[in-house]
Image (tube, grey):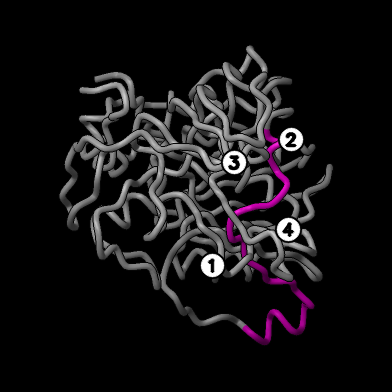
Amino acid sequence: MTTNKMLASLLVAPGKIELAEREIPVPAPDEVLVRVASVGVCGSDVHFFHDGKLGDWVVDEPLVLGHESGGTIVGVGSEVANTRVGERVSIEPQHPSSSSPETLRGDYHLDPHMRFYAVPGTDGAFQEYVTIQSHFAHAIPDSVSDHAAALMEPLSVAIATARKGGFTPGQRLLITGAGPVGIAVAQVARAYGVSEIVVSDVAADRREAALRFGATEVFDPIAEGPEGLEPVDVFVDASGAASAVRTGIDALKPSGRAVLVGMGLPEIPLPVTTIQNRELIVTGVFRYANTWPTAISLVASGAVDLDSMVTGTFGLDQVQEALESTANPTTIKTVVEPFRH
């Protein structure tokens, strides 16, 4: 392989991944070139892999998946200081318009013109090198591992969820779904001082994992049902299951908040009378904005443990196996290491 070439893992058809040689990207003036060390596998990657689409996004040409990534800066654009070369970074995988109304008011993650890693039209990080605007390559301290650098992205989803839910000390929180995002939300809730963290999941392995990562109570929604569930101040759905959303909203105290994070059906029935009579706030989370400083601080201080969430590592030539591994209920987070061939 020549020096200006790299390996990339491509989704070429639903259920089909191929390893290909590509040109190493050249950073634009405001960008940096990152040698990718670690990439987390997300549920959206799995949806694209199995179905070739996710919501309105359809994969109609080969696409590099993976948007949770970290690595080392090895090159810079003309507007970026050379002193950044060699810096270890966590990548915020967004490229919004600089002048959209959403960006100008601080909600850059909602920019309709967003270019986001691993969404059709923009390649992701299952490759050896990527480029990103320099301000979205966040420096990390030496105490933070490459895996943790990658997993700052799902942690940022959890931080955005905490902000939407108004997490504060003394609250009782219900999280439905103990996958990676549910586990990350539990950790953030613990760090924010939430007193009671109740996690629901149908898989025993995931309920046990939730207890290791901050849950104070777990239950099986099939075997136990919602009948004995004590009222909660905040509800977070990280499952996408319609039944879980209904259970959580019904469990909210008056003036409680429901934050919908999990990917599920595009439409589900909601208990409108309950929402009105209790004056509940029901909102969603779509990515994040201005979360990386908080994420890095939580990990560097030891308040959140991302490394222990990693349950499997794979090379760039094993991306298909990495994607398929997420179906195992013992899996919390799968990571791809692009230079481990």
> Residue 194, how many percent across, how many down?
76, 42
> Residue 55, how many percent across, how many down?
39, 70
* The label number, if any, that marks residue 293 in the structure image: 2
Tell me the quarter of the picture where residue 187 sits.
Answer: top right
Answer with left or right where residue 169 lies relative to residue 307: right
Answer with left or right where residue 325 lies relative to residue 253: left
Label 4 secondary element: helix
The amino acid marked with disc number 1 is Val
Q: 208 or 165, which lies in front?
A: 165
**Most extreme residue toward the bottom, as rendered?**
273
- Give the Cα separation between the discs numbered 2 and 4: 17 Å
Mark 1 is surrounded, within 10 Å at the Cα level, by few (under 14), some (14 to 19) or many (20 or more) other residues, namely many
Specify the segment rendered in magenta.
272-295
> Residue 231, how many percent across, how many down?
71, 60
The amino acid marked with disc number 4 is Lys
Label 2 secondary element: helix
The amino acid marked with disc number 3 is Pro
**Residue 109 shows in this picture:** yes
- Give the Cα separation between the discs numbered 1 and 4: 16 Å
Q: Which residue is mark 3?
A: 29
Is residue 77 shown in magenta? no
- Give the Cα separation between the discs numbered 1 and 2: 30 Å
Q: Which residue is mark 4?
A: 164
Mark 2 is surrounded, within 10 Å at the Cα level, by few (under 14), some (14 to 19) or many (20 or more) other residues, namely few
Q: Which residue is mark 1?
A: 245
